[in-house]
Image (cartoon, rainbow, N blue to C red):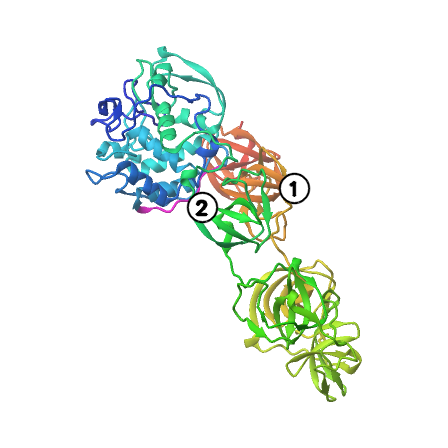
Amino acid sequence: MASIALVVAPVVVPAVAAEPTAVDVSASTVVNGANADTGIVQAAADVGFDAENIISDTLFYDGAAMTAAEIQSFLDAKIGTCRNGKCLNVLTAGISSRDAVYSQTTGNLICSAIQGGTMKVSELIYRVQVACGISAKVILVTLQKEQGLTTSKEPSDWNLKAAMGASCPDTAPCDPAFAGVGPQILKGTQQLKTYKAANFAKQPGRNWIGYNPNAACGGTTLNIQNYATAALYNYTPYQPNAAALAAGYGLGDGCSSYGNRNFYNYYTQWFGSTQRNVCDQPPYTQVRAASGIMAAAADVPARATADENCNVGAVWLPKGMTVSVSAEFGEWYWVDVNGTMYWMRKAHLVTYDPCTQPPYGEVSGAGGTYVTSAILTARASANDSCTAGARDLPAGSEVIRAATWKEWSWVSVKGTMYWVKSSQLTVAPSTCTQPRYEQVTGASGTFKAAASTARTAPADGCATGAVAVSAGTKVTAGAAWGDWYWVNVSGAMLWMRKADLAAVQTCNQPPYEQVTGASGMFTTSGAVDARTAPDAGCATDARSLPVGTAVKVVAAWSDWYWAEYDGHNYWIRKDALSAVTCTQPRYEEVRGAAGTKQVASATTGRSAPSTTCTVGTALPAGASVTLAAEWSDWYWVQSGSDMLWVPKSALTDPGTMVTTTAALNLRSGPGTTYGILAVIPSGVAVRQVGASGDWRQVVYGGTTGWVSAAYVR
C-alpha cells in the first residue's frame, strides 16, 4: 500500500493496499505484457526516472492543472463503459464542507476552505486540487497507482474504500474514518500538501531511502531535489531498485517496490514529462482554440507562458488595454499584444466594450474651432466599432476641439461631446479658436450677468453663434480660461467675460433625486476648497484642503463629489480630485526576493504596493509568508494561494520554535489578568514571535497570544 507510511508488499506491481479481491492493475491482470484494462504495454525499462527528482514542484503543486470538465473527459477516455456503476467516471461521492486547514507547527496554509456536498468524482477532484494546490494529474495518478481506479471498469468496494491509500499503513488496517472515495481523495491530497506546508517528515536534501520494507534489501542516500519528490517519498517511502526499473510496469525481484516507479510510469504515459521549467510552454495537446477581443481588467501582467512563476519577458498592461485572444489553456488565454503573443490569466481580462473611453493619461489637451471636410460619423468613443450614440455630421459642420488621442479629436458639437477622426477636420476660417485644453481650469458657481454677449469662443471678435445676454440673467460656470468663464446660458455652453459676471452667494443643496451614488478613495490634486454646497459661491463653513488630502467619496451631483473628510461631509469639485488606484510598479523596477518572513503585527496585504490601495486581505500577527519579489519599501509575498504586497516594516524574520512542557493557557496579553484564547496541550511545538518579561508571545493554530515562559523550552 502506498499510503502515508508504507507501500505494497514487494510482489505486487502497483503500490496498493492488500485487499480481499484482485485490483485491476495487479500482477494477476498483466496479460502478455500488457495491462488488461489500460492496454499499457509493459516497457522493457523506465528511461528518465530520476530517484532524486521524480517530478518538478511546478507540475506537482499546480492548483490549476485541469478543469472539472477536463478531468471528466480524461476519466471517460480511460475507463470507457463502466461494468458495475462504481467507476470514477460515473460515480458520485460526498465530502463535508470544511474550513481552511493550517499547520500548527509553521502556521502555513495547507488547504483552503472547501465546499462539500455530493458531486461527480471529477468535480470533487477539481475542488480538492484548487483548495490544496495539488495538481489533479497527481491525484489521478495516485488513484491509479494505489487502487487502479483511474482506469478500472469494475472497481470493488475495497478499491473505493482505500482509493488513495490514505491512512492505510502496511502494518495495520486502513483507518475507517477516511473510508470512501470522497474522504480518501481529500485526506490523501491534504497529506501530500502537509509535508511541505508543515515542514513535516522528509524534506529536500540528503535522505536515506530504502528499496523495500525489508531492511535487509538496503537502500541509498538520495539528495532529494525538491518538495514534490520529498512528498512522494513520505507518502510511499521506498525507491525502486534496478530490477523494478528494468521491469517497466512488471515485476522486479524480491527487494523491489513499485509505488514511486508506477507514479512516474503513469504520469509520463498520460501527461508527458514530469519535469517542466516554469517558462516552458503548456502541452500543445491541451491548448484549445479561442477567439475574441478582451480588455485588461486592471493593470495586469502578460507572461511568456501560462505560469505565474515565469517572469522572463513579462510585461504589464494598463487597465483597459485591448488584446486579441487566439487560444486558451486552463485558466489562461493566449493573446496578441501589439503583435507579440503572451499568456494572460482569464481572471485578469474582461469582455471588451468598444465604447470604452481611452485612458485619461493618454489624452492630450487641444483647442480650436474646426469644420468637417466631408460627411463623417461622430462617436461616443474613439473607436470605429462604437456605434452607440453615434451621429453623422454633414460636411462643413463647425466643431470645437477640446482634446486629442491618437488619430482622434474630442470635439463639442452644439454642446455635446463626440470623438471624430482628426484627418476629417480643417481649421475654421474665423477668430473663434478655442483655448488649449490643458490651459482650461475647472470652475463652478452661479453668476448674475450684466447686459453683455456670450460667445462660442473666448474672443471678443468671435461672432459665430454669439448670444445677447440681458442684465440679471443667471448663468452657471463650468470652466475658466484667462478673463473668461465657460458658462451655461439657457442650456448652451458659451464663453463670457468674467468682468460681466457677479457671483451669486448660494449654499442651496441640489435636489435629492438628482444626487447619485458614488464611491472610492480620492486625493486632492491641488489645494482645493471643500464646501457645504456644490457651488463655488458658497463660503459658509468652507475649508481649504492641501494637495494630497485623502477623502472618501460617497455621492455625486453634476461636477461635484460629496465626500467624507475629518468626520464631516463636503462638496468638492470632481476635477480637483484624483482617484486612488491600485497601480502596479514598473516591471523593470521590481527585484526578485526569496525566503520566509513572519507578520510582526496584524496588517493588510494589498493588491498593489500602496497604503491607499483598499483592495487587500487581512494578515494576522504571526502568519508566515513566502517572499517572491520586492519594490521600494514593499515585499510581494505569497500567503496561502494569495499573492499580496506587504510593507517591509510589517514583516520580521520567523520566530524560534518552542515546545510546551505542560498544558497551559494561551492568553490575549502578557499576564494572568488577560482572557484565555485557547489551551495548548503539553508537548506541542509553537512559534515564538515576541517576549515581555516572564511571558512569551507565540502562534498556535493560527492564533497569536501569550504564554508563561516557565512552561516552554
Q: Quadrant of residue 114?
A: top left
Q: Residue furthest top?
A: 216
Q: Position of residue 373 (x, y in %)?
A: 65, 72
Mark 2: which amino acid?
Glu
Which of the two residues, 271 or 298, is positioned nearer the viewer here? 271
What's the mark number on residue 64? none
Q: Is residue 117 magenta?
A: yes
Quadrant where the N terminus is found in the figure: top left
Residue drawn at point x = 31 percent, y = 13 percent: 253
Q: Position of residue 270 (x, y in %)?
A: 36, 32
Image-based side of 460 in relation to 172, left or right: right
Mark 1: which amino acid?
Glu
Quadrant where the C terminus is found in the figure: top right
Q: CA distance from mark 1 to mark 2?
A: 27 Å
Q: Which residues are magenta?
A: 109-118
Q: Position of residue 235 (x, y in %)?
A: 38, 27
Res. 86 visible in picture: yes
Residue drawn at point x = 33 percent, y = 30 percent: 167
Q: Position of residue 686 (x, y in %)?
A: 51, 32
Above or below residue 514? Residue 72 is above
* Secondary structure under the numbered disc 2 in the rendered image: strand
Q: Quadrant of residue 271?
A: top left
Q: Which residue is mark 1?
A: 588
Q: Which residue is mark 2?
A: 328
Res. 198 visible in picture: no
Q: Is residue 708 magenta?
A: no
Neighbour class for label 1 at 10 Å: few (<14), some, many (≥20)? few
Which of the two residues, 550 or 712, is positioned nearer the viewer here? 550
